[in-house]
Amino acid sequence: MLRALPLLLLATPVLAQAPVDDGTPNLPDTMPAFAEQTDAPEIFSGITFDEEVISGALAHPWGLAILPDEAGYVVTERGGSLRHITRDGTMGPEISGVPSVRAMRQGGLLDVTLAPDFEQSRVLYLTYSARDGLVGSATALARATLSEDHTALEAVTELWRQTPASAIPAHFGSRVIVQPDGGLIVTTGDRLTPENRELAQDPVNAAYGVVVGFAPDGSLTANDALRDVLPGIVSYGHRNIQGAAIQPGTDALWTLEHGPAGGDELNIVEEGGNYGWPLVSYGVNYNGSDVGTGEQAHAPDFIEPRYYWDPSIAPSDMVFYQGEMFADWQGDILLGALAGQSLVRLDVEDDTILGEERLRVGEGRVRDVEIDENGALLILIDADPGALIRLTPAAE
């Protein structure tokens, strides 16, 4: 019997690791376009965190930027406040000079990022829902200079505003990130309603559900792959892009967007690309009806997502991890989940997702994820009160 044991082991099939148990999918019979497009095997790193609440007194924090030279952080609050927080958690008063926002439902003061030369110029960028008329609002981008004492914004200039404005205070996007050449990327949403979302397929007349590019001098980029569209539009056919990051080593732009019920997407942005919304989706409308014609496959008419979730996790921002503190995660994607209330790690090889891990499950809506100067993770919890939290590996 002992000699037969190896033969029995060889005859036993190797079982694939099951995906994360998210519950019942909205479209259980969907066939992905390729094997790794959804339901990657659940993976376990064995990492647990020591958590330091840097500040637990924020009101719906949305965006986070890390100041150089140990100067702390700047954090946006959706209601319209910009805050400076020191590394030990001391929070100053509201920074003055912030652009006026229409803080309603999903709108308000949204993302923040620093210019590449911030140490010399003190320039940062903000996205927000700008007031437009009595009830309208539009995603906007502004440039400003932060005072040396972190108390005021100066020389505030609006660089761009989404057109047309909408009275619907939802689906604004909106992340702003710096490209490798020093230019900017801003993401927008489709403004939610059936009438508005149709404009995600009309980049000639609307900047709804698009990626917008800016040259280093702040001018809108030209797109040779799209003709006669609004200036600066890089790609279109997106629903509500809440996350964006540049992949180290490739300079590829990856984005995260909310689907309806199911169909959250992780995309690699191609210049001139059409990503299909609202004609196709790997999800369904909130009332259970089909999106568009009911087709899920994007190709050949539209660009396929590299990964999608069904049911939805409502992904927020994302980073590609680079640092020594979590050495085994180099190049992996770390993203926040709002409905999923977790920090999600995706094991990435080139442009393929090989595995998925859920961390801090059920501990709050993670709105932003950043990598601190020492390789620690920083997350924002979107609540009132919300929090800025530093995560480091727990001592064994």
Image (cartoon, helix red, strand yellow):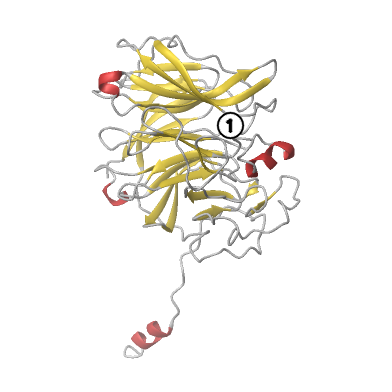
**Residue 126 at x, y percent in the picture:** 45, 23
Which residue occupies 66% across, 64% down?
Answer: 29
Which residue occupies 26% across, 42% down?
Answer: 325
Q: Is residue 304 above or below residue 278?
A: below
Give residue 176's quadrant in the image.
top left
Judged from this view, the residue extending furthest toward the front is 228
Nearer the observer, 171 or 58: 171
| Residue 261 at least partly seen | yes
**Residue 228 at x, y percent in the picture:** 57, 41
Q: Is residue 31 left or right of residue 374?
A: right
Secondary structure, mark 1, is loop
Nearer the observer, 360 or 79: 79
What residue is disc 1 on?
172
Which residue occupies 61% across, 46% down?
Answer: 259
Q: Is residue 23 left or right of residue 62?
A: right
The image quadrant where one finds the C terminus is top left
Nearer the observer, 334 or 280: 280
**Residue 106 at x, y percent in the picture:** 61, 28
**Residue 338 at x, y percent in the picture:** 54, 38
Give residue 195's quadrant in the image.
top right
Q: How many marks?
A: 1
Q: Is the residue marked by circle 1 packed among few (<14), some (14-19), or many (20+) residues within 10 Å?
A: many
| Residue 318 at least partly seen | no
The image quadrant where one finds the N terminus is bottom left
Amino acid type indicated by mark 1? Phe
Q: Is residue 7 left or right of residue 266?
A: left
Which residue occupies 39% across, 33% down?
Answer: 215
Give residue 68's quadrant in the image.
top left
